[in-house]
Every structure is written in structure tokens, then in C-alpha cells.
Image: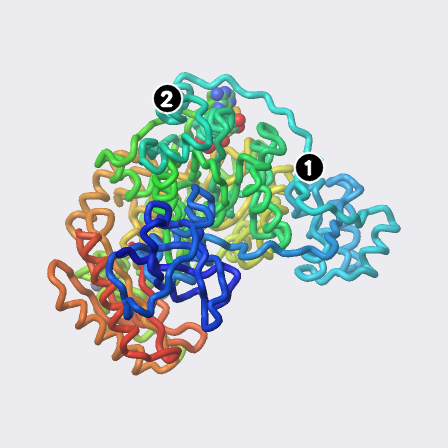
Amino acid sequence: MQFADIIVDISVKSLDRPFQYRIPESMEADAVIGALVEIPFGKGNRIMRGYIIDLSDTPRFDVTRTKEIVGVVRQGVVAESHLLTLAHWMKRQYGGTMNDAIKAVMPVRREIREKQKRQVCPTISRQEMFALRETLEKKHQTARVRVLDALLSATPYEAGVDYDFLCRNYKATLAVLSAMEEKGILTITSARLYRNPYENIQTKADVPDLNAEQQEAVNRICRPRALSEKGDISAEDEKDAVQKNERNSHVYLLHGVTGSGKTEVYMQCIDRVISAGKQAIVLIPEIALTLQTVNRFYARFGDKVSVLHSRLSAGERSDQYTRAKNGEISIMIGPRSALFTPFERLGLIVIDEEHEGSYRSESMPKYHAREVAVKRAEMLGADVILGSATPSIEAYYLAEQGEYEKIILTERAGGARLPSVEIVDLRRELEEKNYSVFSRSLAEKMRERLAGHEQMILFLNRRGYAGFVSCRKCGEVPGCPHCAVSLKPHSRYGKVSSLQCHYCGYEIPMPDSCPKCGSKYIGMFGLGTEQVEQMVAKQFPDARVIRMDADTTGGKEGHDRVLEKFAGGEADILVGTQMIVKGHDFPRVTLVGVLAADLSLHIGDYRAAERTYQLLAQAAGRAGRGKRPGEVVLQTYQPEHYSVVCAAAQDYESFYRQEVLMRQVLQYPPVSHILEILVLSKEESLAKEFAKDLADKLRCKEELHVLGASEASIGKLRDIFRYVVYGKSADMEKMIQAKDELEEYIHGKGLGSRCTVQFSFD
Ligand code: ADP
Ligand code: ZN
Ligand code: ZN
């Protein structure tokens, strides 16, 4: 006898528990995972619809009381059933509840019925709007300035902004908007449902002739097997092929230096995919989802494209999903969540900047978009292209293992040269009594640029910066002797009292002199963009500076505006954090200065070197994207560190070799897997004791190395105490098993809302 676990129709609230039903023999062939079925539900046995998420041949309850499925509605390859199967896989892979997983794959649960959708569109040009904004700001007309800010941040500009969104997020009122409409600044229109927000964009793009490397990449990715072996096959045949698993999915790692024309390669591959009647998803990190990037796709593919981004209203999102489901569009561009676009004929998933941290979800289930993309593609027989100038160690490792096919682009498209890089030793500067944050060499190059009216970027590497202790004299940063990561300062009563390893809990009291050179100048490192801005003003009073970081630019709108000002030549120097590293081309930038290149080496994470390499290589990639060659200055206390040396030489291969060796020695991913167990509770002792209990349970498992329990790197967040346990093993299946058992154990404890436990894999 066969049994099915069924999630009742997704509009029902308590989804969490799958219900088990018996499968009548006559339906066994059709009742596959993902099938939509009809079942009698509840006391009244009302007939409801549900999806099969799992099959088994053992009943969980009394067989005589288990109800039967009454009919299979659809057994086909509908997007929903695939997404549900995917959700099920994610739940098992990453832990958490089925409800969490379903929420992740179906962000729009129900179609939101729009009452009357209104749109606010500009009637003056972007330049005029900028000018008007300045004027109104001087007059302190803040309500109107807010409206202009919203309009200026629309992508594309002509499309305007959703009325409700404007009122909600920018506190606009009908009175203000009407007044502005009367002045001829904007119009308020009611839009029809399923509107394409990008309808009125002009599309026409010159398709560049690919260079030899790009062409070779496209040919390899699109070689006949990559589309469909049988050519243009019918939906029925395709369904067949997918079910028989005939269409093998393939993953490509496109490793190309910055500016090597990866985006061109994606677009050509997408072109082929949609010509074959299939659909494509393009994931781009939110931070890089700029007007520039999106417009390239619109210019090429017109209204076949849709974009999901965080500034769409719920209604607009819902529209985009519906259009995708109805097959009205063929390409969806967006951040992580766009991965779950309900395309039924998905042929290709592109993940640009594959190494980006934002591809990992921070809420349950803590999935990684790369892994889920590969799984989804596998289920549908689609292909995946992972693109990066600085691939993640994981992806490169899998390529080395033969899981992914590696394709390399070695030169910049369009002939631009890679910049030359100089490494400056900050310890030397101090010895030579230069106390400025700008080394002598950087200062001189800055002076040259200012004189020659060229632009430059000063980059403060602050990725994942949570503070660390370092010696101002020799650059020493105390590290954990067991885990090869830097120790994190822990404060009690507003003062740093100790340094701790956030993996294993190793702890030392805060030293009062440098353990290496004995200098008294040891303490928390503190340099912000604001200080850098002030120092520029002091040392280069004539320079026009703009600053950009997460705290100052008021989210993405501000971010785009700052970048636009800079691109428009309104400033000589852009000071910022990692936010300026990508998504924008600044052809007039000929100098990039990285003020403290090694900062990201101290994030207390085993990925520190990888992050550092990525940031430095990407920052360097910003220089010299135009006709003039670029120069890069990397200032660092650790000029000999391999991440710095290899980034300066743009030598990924060497970096990878050294890094993967480290990971092997210390049993870090991708060589081994890490299970992170985060225990959260308002009661500190409960969090601590329960974490210890779980660690002990985990220690009973074979072939599993356990670290902790210890306080999480953020030990307390919004009054909730956080403890962590880490498990390491080379065997992923074992880890998943251990996690499943712990979940059972935790469930049995019945702690309810007093204590929650989150699992994630690394
Ligand atoms: P990546 O995505 O690798 O950073 P892009 O695709 O953005 O690179 O290309 C960088 C620049 O080079 C862009 O301005 C693009 O228009 C241009 N470009 C790309 N391919 C070609 C080509 N084959 N011929 C001329 N210019 C190209
Ligand atoms: Zn020292
Ligand atoms: Zn440690």
C-alpha cells in the first residue's frame, strides 16, 4: 500500500503539517510528488485540493482510519508542483518547517486583488527633476522632495512609482501629489492590471560582435544538448523527457575578469533559450540591480523581460508572477527570490556575481540560491550559468571536481586594459612618520588626478565589519589558535573585556599591549567613511567629495542618486564602502585607492581571506574601465598576505590553490561541511544550557566534529540571547541525518516559544 504526505491547498493557513492519505491502487501511477490531488478534509470531509510532497509505503497512523485520495487533478509539470517539490527538498536540506520552505518558494501566496491601481509618473525630464529637487530642498519643501526622491529612484525613470507605495513609503498625500500634478511635474494615472511597468521604455540595442573567447563560451553553453536534443519538442514530449530524466541539466561556471563581457554572454545564451521557446531567470544581487544593468536587458529583449526588486508593491510583484505563470514574459531578472519565478518552461538560470553573500538567505530556511538553482534546474532539465570574476571557493571547487563545467574569459571586452596595482605597506608609513590615512604614494596619485580632472574612488573595506582589535603599530590582530580566525571583542558594561573566537568559544582577556610588538597602541579599529571624507577635505581642500555608505544614503534610492551624481562628473572623489564596488561603470575613474585592504581579513569568519580577495579584485576592477588605463593602490598592514598579493596580480588561480589548502587543513567548506545550530531564547540560561545539551547530543554521532556551545558572534539581539553549536563533517548525508534527529529531539522537548533553534548548513 502507498501513502502520500499532502500539503493542503496553499491558501489554507495552517500549512505546516502534511497530512497522510492512502493512495488508491488505481491512482498510484499518477500520484507522484508534486501532483495536485483532491482529498476529503476535516470532520465534514469537505473535498479540498492539496499537493503531494512525499510518498512512503508505511502508514504513520492507524491504516483503517487513514483517508483516501479521491482524485488526481493534475499530474503535470506545473510550476507549482515543482516549486513544492523544491520546497520539500529545501526543508530537508536546510532545516526549518515546511511552512517556511513554502513561503520561500511561493512569496506571493494569493493573487492580490487590486482595487484600483494608480501610478504616479513624471512629466518632466530626469535632469529637470534633479534641478527641481535642489530648489525645493533649499526651500525646505520636504514633502515634495520626498516625492521627487521616489520618482528619481524609479527603474526605469519613465515608469514612475506605484501610488500606494508612494503614500506608504514616502509619506506622500493626495494633496501634495495633486498640487504637483497641477504644476505639471507629474501625472497620476490609473493603470490596468498586469501592466508591464516597463512598457514605455524604448528598446533598441546594438548587439556587439562577440570576441573569440565570448563566442567560444556561448558555443559551449549552447551546444545542442544544452537546449533540447530533439529540437523543438512539444510540451507533452518535454514532460515525458523530464519525467524520464532524459534532459540532463548542466552547470557552467563562467569565470571572467571584470569587464570581460560576461553579461553579453548571458544575453546571447538567453536569446537562444527563448528562441527555443523556453524561459530564463537571471539573478543579480540587489545592490547591483541598477538602472544600467536592467536597461541592458530591456534594450535587448524588450517586453519579454520583467524585473522583481524590493521596491515593487505587493500588487506589482503579484502581477509579475502572474505574467510569468501565464507565459507572457520569458525572462525574469531579480535578486535571490526571483529564483522561484513560476516559469513552466524554464530552460536557463543565470546567477551573476555568483560569489555574493546576498545569495544566502538570512531567514529560515537559510538556503543558498546557487544550490537551490542547481537543484531546480536538475528537476526541470534546465541549465545554470554561474558567473563571476572572483568565483566562490565552493563553486570553483565543484568545477575542479567535475560537477560544474568551467569556462574562462581572460581579457576585457572592448579592449580596456586591466589596471596596474601597487601594494603599500602601512607599517612603513608609520615608521616614516606619515600619520595620514593616505600613504605618500596614494596622496601623490590623488594630487595628479585632481590636477588632470580625472576621477577616483576611495574604498574603505568594511565588509561584515563588526569591530576587531588591532595594533596600530605593527598591524597585529589576535587570532584563535584553533580555528585560524581573528578573535572578536566582547564588551561588558560598554568596555571591551575579552576577545573570543566565535566558532569554538576560546577566550582571552583584552590585552593592554600588543602581544607581538609590545606597543601600547592596541585597541578597537575605527575608521569610517565620514572620517575619510573629513581627511580628504583637510588634505585636499579643493577636491569635490561625495560619500556613500549604508548609513548615509538612505537606502537604494540615495545610493543610485549618489552614483549618478558621480558618474555625471559632479565630484572628483567618491568615498565609500563595498557598496560602490559593483553595478556601475565609471569610465572616468582612473584611480582606486583601497584604504585598509586587510580589514576584511578580521571578520572572524573562515571566509575572511576569500572575502578579502573578492573585494580587492572587484575594487581593482573599477579602475580603468574606459579608454585611459587605471591605477590601483592597496594600502595594507599585511602586504604579504596571499589574498592581497593574488588580488593585486588578479591571479585567482593561485589564490584558490592556497585557500583550498587552508580549508583542507582546517576542515572548512567546501572540503568539509559545517552545520550551524543557533539557539535563541529570551532566557539566557535556557539558551546556554539547551545549546550545551544539543552539542552533547551531537557529540554522540560518529564522524562528526563538534565545536561549542558558545555565545554567537552577536550574543544578544533585540533582547534575545543567542548561542551556537557547530558540527563539521565531510559527509553531508550524515549531517542531514544528525540535523533531522536533533529536530525530532527538540520537538520532543516541547519548549515552544521559550526557545527556538535554527539550523543552517555552510
Ligand atoms: P562583465 O559582465 O564581465 O563585467 P560586461 O558584459 O558588462 O562585462 O562588459 C563590459 C563592457 O564591455 C560593457 O560596456 C560591454 O558593453 C562591453 N562589451 C562586452 N562585450 C563586448 C564585445 N564583444 N565587443 C565590444 N564591447 C563589448
Ligand atoms: Zn604590535
Ligand atoms: Zn576557535
Confirm if mark 1 falls within 8 A of ligand 1: no
Q: Residues within 10 Å of mark 1 (few under 14, many from 20)?
A: some
Is 24 positioned to the left or the right of 114 in the image? left
Q: Which mark is residue 243?
A: none
**136 and 438: which is toward the camera:** 136
- Please determine whether, in this image, residue 206 is positioned above or below residue 745: above
- What residue do we see at 44% from left, 30% from top? 262
Which element carries disc 1, helix, strand or loop?
loop
- Residue lying at the far left in this picture: please name it: 702
Q: How many marks?
A: 2
How far across and how far down the image is residue 275, in percent? Answer: 51, 24
Circle 2: residue type:
Arg
Q: Is 294 on the left-hand or right-hand side of 59?
A: right
Q: Give the labeled residue for mark 2.
A: 223
Q: State the residue at coordinates (28%, 62%).
A: 676
Pointer 2: residues within 10 angstroms few (<14), some, or many (20+)? few
**Residue at the spot of label 1:** 199
Q: Residue at x 68, y 30 (%)?
A: 202
